[in-house]
Each structure stands twice: as structure tokens, then as C-alpha cells.
Image (spheres, rainbow, N blue to C red):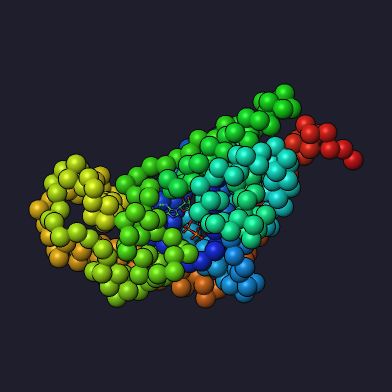
Amino acid sequence: TPRVFSGIQPSGGLTLGNYLGAIKRFVSMQDEDYETVYCMVDMHAITAKFLDPKTLAHNTRELAAGFIASGVSPEKSILINQSQVPEHAQLAWIFNCVARMGWMGRMTQWKDKAGKNAEAASLGLFAYPALMAADILIYHATHVPVGDDQKQHLELTRDIAAKFNHDYGVDFFPITEPVIEGAATRVMSLRDGSKKMSKSDPSDASRINMTDDADAIAKKIRKAKTDPDALPSEVEGLEGRPDARNLVNIYAALNEQSIEEVLRDVGGQQFGTFKPALAELAVAKLAPISTEMARLMAEPDEIDRILKRGSEQAREITAPILKKTYEIVGMVG
Ligand code: AQP
């Protein structure tokens, strides 16, 4: 069976962007013909800024609770925390020696996150995509469900696999396929339709957190930036209207409809009508998840047990792949 791998950083709380862009697909892939491995990438979470240890631990458990509450089943999927499966980091070192500085320097996420002061950025932030390639390839995963923003990193993962195979004259690492599907592969900020919705945006009003209560969700949607026009009934009518498009995409993804279907129903409506309907839908879909997250967070030992069992299952896959990699590279003893 083909294997799926994907991860999310415990760098903050989960957002609606993570849920619609990634987790919803994690859940559906469990029931398709795949073996699925889903990961809290705690080693990635410390690349951008210092996180105090309590926050990192809390975020990691909360993220695991978010996965499970959203429908990722520890019975159907292997659920792990990255640092607890050491083969990720071990393979990453080899990939640090395969990847080129020039490739890494071209990554838009590096440029965005390092900003103008690259000298002050961590070495880990620069090497992030090589660790991400290792996360995926240590499972020989062939399919990676992600949001649209991760496309470039997945191309780099393919380049690293191809260069390793070429340099060592083997056909060992698979060339991975990104799975970027659905109506909301790129959920935008509620305050600025040209910016991605992100956990680390300083404005809390820019995002819906998976832990927001019904009032907070309704308020953020009511205040979301829009334009003065009515909603169109055809997709072309969203051209040049990023904020309107974003709300329609969110509605479609939450309601599991196509954008065309949504516009057929809501075309002609003013935002004064559409926003309350969107808020109601969002609360209906998200409230059960946040309630379940809170219940799971009351039992952190149970979360730790699930992650520990996941690590054991994961290492049955990763240890032999690392061993074989070391043999290929000529690491003996
Ligand atoms: N706005 C988004 N729309 C669709 N998908 C998104 N993803 C993130 N934001 C959106 C997808 O969620 C997965 C996990 O992302 P991540 O936590 O590893 O890192 P990120 O993409 O950098 O997410 P954030 O929320 O923006 O975190 P910070 O602010 O810490 O950088 C990925 O599949 C991503 O595509």
C-alpha cells in the first residue's frame, strides 16, 4: 500500500487554514487505500523563534488533540511527535549534505520568515526543508497532503530524493506526490485577502483558531474584510475580489461543496446575509471539534500514550529505512 505522511508545526494553536488545508484531507485519506502517518513536527516548531519549553509541550499535546478531535484516528493512522522518532533527524543530516545552499536560499518560506535579517535567522530555519524531506522520505511516503503554500518544499523534497538516488546510483527514495486538493488549499487572512491565514499572524482577528468559541468565530466572520458588492453567481465574478473569494472558499470547504455550487445558492446575496450563514456553518462544524479537543486536553497522559505507541509503530518503518540508507552511503560499524 502507498504511504501518506504529513505534519503540522506545534508553533501555536491550530487555525482554520490548517484544518481545511491539511487535516480534513488527513482524515479522508485514512479511509482510502493508504497507510497514513501524521506528525506533530516539534523540531520544526523551534526553527523560527524561541518557544519556552512549557509552551512547546502544551502546543504539541494540543495539536495531537486537534488531530484526534478532527477525526484522525490513532487506530487507523500512526500519530507521532517528530522528535520522538530519531530517524527523522538522522536522515535529515544526510539530506543536509545532499541539498545545496542555493536550493535552500530560493525557498520563499525562508525568505519570508528570515526577512531582511537573514544573518540573525537560525541555521535550523534555513535547513527546514531538508528536515521536511527527511520526515517524508524516512517513511518512503509517496503522497503528502498539504496546503498550497507547501508546494515549493515538496518540489525540493523531490529534488533531494532524485539527487540522492543519482549520486549513489540507486533507486531508493521515491519521488513524492503532493496532494493539494479541495476548495480551501489556501485560506487567507480575514483581515487581508492577499495574506495567508497563519498561526503566527500578530492579529488574532486575522484567523479562526480551532479553540475559538462560537461568539469569537461569529465576531471574526462578521468583522472579516469584504467589499461592498453582492456575491456573484459565477466563479468569474470573484476575479479581483480576494476577500470575497476567501469567504466563499471557506464556506465551500466547510460545507463540502464546490465553489460553483455555493455561488449558485448564494449569488446575489449581500455580505450582511452571507456572513451570518457562514458563521453559523463554521460554528456547527468547528464547535464539536473544540469541545472534543478540550476533553482530550484534560487527559494529557492519554495523549502521551497515543504518541508513544505511534513512535513505536513508526520506528518499525523508519529504523530499517535508515539502516539501508546508511549502507548505501557507506556508514559502517
Ligand atoms: N492558510 C492556510 N491555508 C491552507 N493550508 C494551510 N496550511 C497552513 N496554513 C494554511 C497547511 O497546514 C499544514 C501545516 O502547516 P505548518 O503548521 O507546518 O506551517 P505553516 O504552513 O507555516 O502554518 P502556519 O499556520 O502559517 O504556521 P506559522 O505561522 O507558524 O508559519 C501545511 O500543510 C500547510 O500547507
Near-viewer residue (117 or 25): 117
Residue 112 in view in this figure: yes
Residue 137 in view in this figure: no
Query: What residue is rendered at 63% in x and 73% in y?
Result: 52
> Which quadrant holds the N terminus?
top right
x%, y% of residue 292?
43, 68
Left or right of residue 303: residue 208: left
Query: What residue is rendered at 53% in x and 57% in y?
Result: 115
Residue that sits furthest to the top in the current view: 169
Name above or below for residue 331 compared with residue 212. Answer: above
x%, y% of residue 209?
40, 67
Near-viewer residue (230 or 259): 230
> Which quadrant holds the C terminus?
top right
Left or right of residue 186: residue 76: right
Left or right of residue 98: residue 212: left
Q: Quadrant of residue 194?
A: bottom left
x%, y% of residue 189?
35, 60
Name above or below for residue 183 compared with residue 297. Answer: above
Left or right of residue 70: residue 156: right
Name above or below for residue 112 compared with residue 1. Answer: below
